[in-house]
Image (cartoon, rainbow, N blue to C red):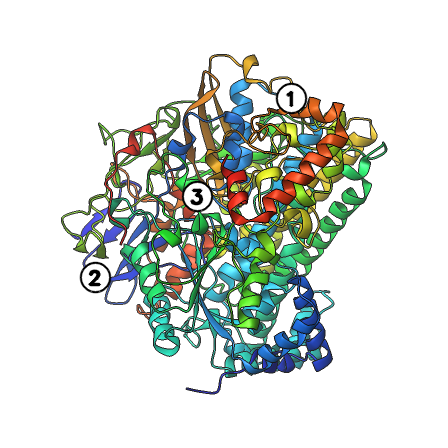
Amino acid sequence: MTKTVTANGFALDTSGQRVVVDPICRIEGHLRIEVNVDEDNVIRNAVSTGNMWRGLEVILEGRDPRDAWAFVERICGVCTGVHALASVRSVEDALGIQIPTNANHIRNLMMLNQYVHDHLVHFYHLHALDWVDVVSALSANPRQTSALAQSISNWPKSSPGYFRDVQNKLKRFVESGQLGPFANAYWGSPAYKLPPEANLMAVTHYLEALDFQKEICKVHTIFGGRNPHPNWLVGGMPCSINVNDTGAVGAVNMAWLNLVSDIIDRSIEFIDQVYIPDLKAIASFYKEWGYGGGLSGKNVLSYGEFPMAANDWSNDNLMMPSGAILDGNLSQIYEVDTRDPDQVQEFVAHSWYSYDDESRGLHPWDGVTDPNFKLGPNAKGTKTNIEALDEDAKYSWLKAPRWKGNAMEVGPLARYIIGYAMGRDDIKGPTDDLLGALGLPVSALFSTLGRTAARGLEASWAAHKQREVFDAMMANIKAGDTATANMDLWEPASWSAQAKGVGMAEAPRGALGHWIKIKDTKIENYQAIVPSTWNASPRDPAGNIGAYEAALLGTPMADPTQPLEILRTIHSFDPCLACASHVISPDGQELAVVKVR
Amino acid sequence: MAHRETFYEVMRQHGITRRSFLKFCSLTAAGLGMGPEFAMKIAHALETKPRTPVIWLHGLECTCCTESFIRSGHPLASDVILSMISLDYDDTLMAAAGHQAEELLEQTIEKYDGNYILAVEGNPPLNEDGMYCIQGGQPFVEKLRHMADHCKAIIAWGSCASWGCVQAARPNPTRATPVHKVIRNKPIVKVPGCPPIAEVMTGVITYMIAFDALPELDRQGRPKMFYSQRLHDKCYRRPHFDAGQFVERFDDEGARKGYCLYKVGCKGPTTYNACSTLEWNDGLSWPVKSGHGCLGCAEDDFWDKGSFYSAVTNMKVMGSAEADADKVGKVLAGAAAIGVAAHAAASVVSHMSDKSRKEVRHD
């Protein structure tokens, strides 16, 4: 049977031509997308496959819980630090450790800073080339480019001469014949809609953003010692504060605090004067491209993030709210309880793992991961040379996480839909302003462009929130509190024999949870369910499709041999596959061995 | 083949004057720890060579190496990518995808057989016929072997490619394997670290292009220019170690004064890297300077050497190979001068040969 309707209400038709895109580039990690297109080249079936698996959790078994953050931080170097933060929170939750106010502020600052950095790099370096034609920029008039840039922003680097220099640089690069990362792409495709001047402006900012991003992350360098992969600490943060005492130069002192403040100002300036105006300008040329909504208009999930007061996870205390929306009913926000065994569960019926009963899901505290790599009967090719997958069988290294049995979308758009539905002013206001400026209804949010726009709005939101958090931290220091770590329960001898905890976070890409069980001071079980596992999820036993798969349906392709439209929608989620596919339990150790050549 | 532009031509076209170009060469020479006479050699090389193609592959990894690379302050990553090398394949940054991306690999082999640099981030898993890392429907290890067969030399970025890193920590369920255990017929430059320092990455690749040669390597395959000294040897907190002034627990009085982190687990005494000299993110800070001990992330097997918060006990510097943290602390607090002398002597010994250095590491 080639035509079906999924349990979550999406019509699938597998009768048309199969198109395989592997690798999907400009993402973190390894992802494969297969689609079927009909005679009009409209996508009627979509298959999302996680192509990698590293098995970090089994590696954690038996180790010191205080070390876990360093291991899991290496789940991802793009959204660096987010797993470390979820990890220290899970251990603190298990052991009942309260962190000091300054540690909470510093963690908030580092996570907000990660949002700003991650979203900016995503927009320009991982996503922009889906909308911006680099070759078209060569034919732009620099004077008109300057006029365009100055009409939308006060950003000072906008003279005709500046754009002419960049254009000349670009021309020489293209004329050299060595096109590097721009080779063999889709330039000139009718799917590109920007005039040459807008293309030149965007390419110029691609280069500026590449140079500027290294400045943003210096907030991590000060508090965590480096970026990527700054250092964290169970109980607080490892960086002591000393602003007015002997040896202050050996700690976080006034000079460093001033640098943090300066970086915050410069981040706000760049986001608001470059990123947001570019986003609006580019979006205005693609308003009719309303595809890619998928699950966003139905089911979205957020765990909430940025507690203003330390150790308080109630929604009133969170700068970014938690909640779940089902069936597109924005008038009802469900509470999310990550400890409830019936809420968050993972299924493996279509994943390369085995359960005793694959019709059921498992809560992460009871998670099992037993690898089982096999292709379905209708797959094409061989085990080590896959031509096409069989999505009716197992087809991904990702499990299928579900909330109360529902496939959910997570990430900036999910957070903005929930914040909007709750009527949070700092979320609803800018969203309405952007929609108004573009002349679009609220329903336009539920799309690929909506996802991309929400990420931009959130980058600006996070840049400004850094200022609020920094000021709150300075006020706290001024009041005499310089503590950054609570070491009362540092020694394992002070821990109970058995404990379990959960560490929640909202990473740039969405809802992130780490579940830990501690026994006799060592890790007994460790499970993480990460944003891209939600979004890139394969099907579940009930037949619900995940967010990537749903979002691709109904999209017309200008030319099926050029996967530009697929890239647009998949990139709008900012995939992170090293994050998504690393889960394993102690059962997963008996594996076949091949010879090294 | 069309005329390929030299690095110098590209710089000139970008509006760089000859004077600035020569200044760049001097800074590069200095940055690599070489004398002014090398500046002209670099200049000559860059004036006459086309941009070297680089194929950058990703296996099992977390992309922290790429992220670190684009943090480089001198040279900027944008200058490296647009002016110094020709980054002909890098799935994290390239515009193309799917078969359009994979075609570029074959095009590079056709045009530059034996003349491109293969940069590898991450490593291949060998269990399950290599299918724990699938690219284009096939095991990553096959792609790695194919591209290695035709390359000139390999750069193993980071601790994954160099040693195995986190996915190879016990019990290494996917049998993640470092590059040198899979590719045996090509020169390999290991640039370990999780991730490596940005300027170490750009420094190594700039050296290879400017000199058209591999950097001098130690016995473990690491460039001596960046990996020949222990962090501890150049740590700015070293005087506190020598004086017996230690952080006893995080955020105590000692921590607020910037005392030595040895007793809370710093692996600086056994880690060979450039963090304490080059530092991170434009030389702003490094882990120790921000209050956390070194994890030892540039060292082989650093995940399996005990807790990150246990003091190093295999350091033959106190006159006792098995001295624990408290003993070390007492010894030093009581006899700082002796500690300095013993430590200095041990440092000299450890530098006499790679062999003795290895013994220090693995005791």
Q: In the image, is residue A349 above or below residue A95?
A: below
The residue singled out by tag 3 in the image is: A579
The residue singled out by tag 2 in the image is: A16
The label on residue A137 is none
Q: In the image, is residue B213 above or below residue B308?
A: below
Name the one closer to the observer, A34 or A76.
Answer: A76
Secondary structure category for the residue under label 1: helix
Res A318 quadrant in image = top right
Structural crowding at the residue carrying mark 2, measured as other residues with C-alpha within 10 Å and reported as few (<14), some (14–19) or many (≥20): some
Name the one closer to the observer, A94 or A451.
Answer: A94
Name the one closer to the observer, A434 or A362.
Answer: A362
State yes or no: discs 2 and 1 in contact (Cβ < 8 Å). no
Subunit ID for the residue under disc 2: A
Give the amino acid at mark 1: Asp
The residue singled out by tag 1 in the image is: B326
The picture places residue B71, in percent across and down from the top left corner, at 61, 56
Residue at screen point 61% across, 43% down: B349
Dot placed on the residue nearer the N-terminal end, 2 or 3: 2
Q: CA distance from mark 1 to mark 3?
A: 39 Å
Give the amino acid at mark 3: Cys
The picture places residue A198, in percent across and down from the top left corner, at 58, 72
Q: CA distance from mark 2 to mark 3?
A: 32 Å
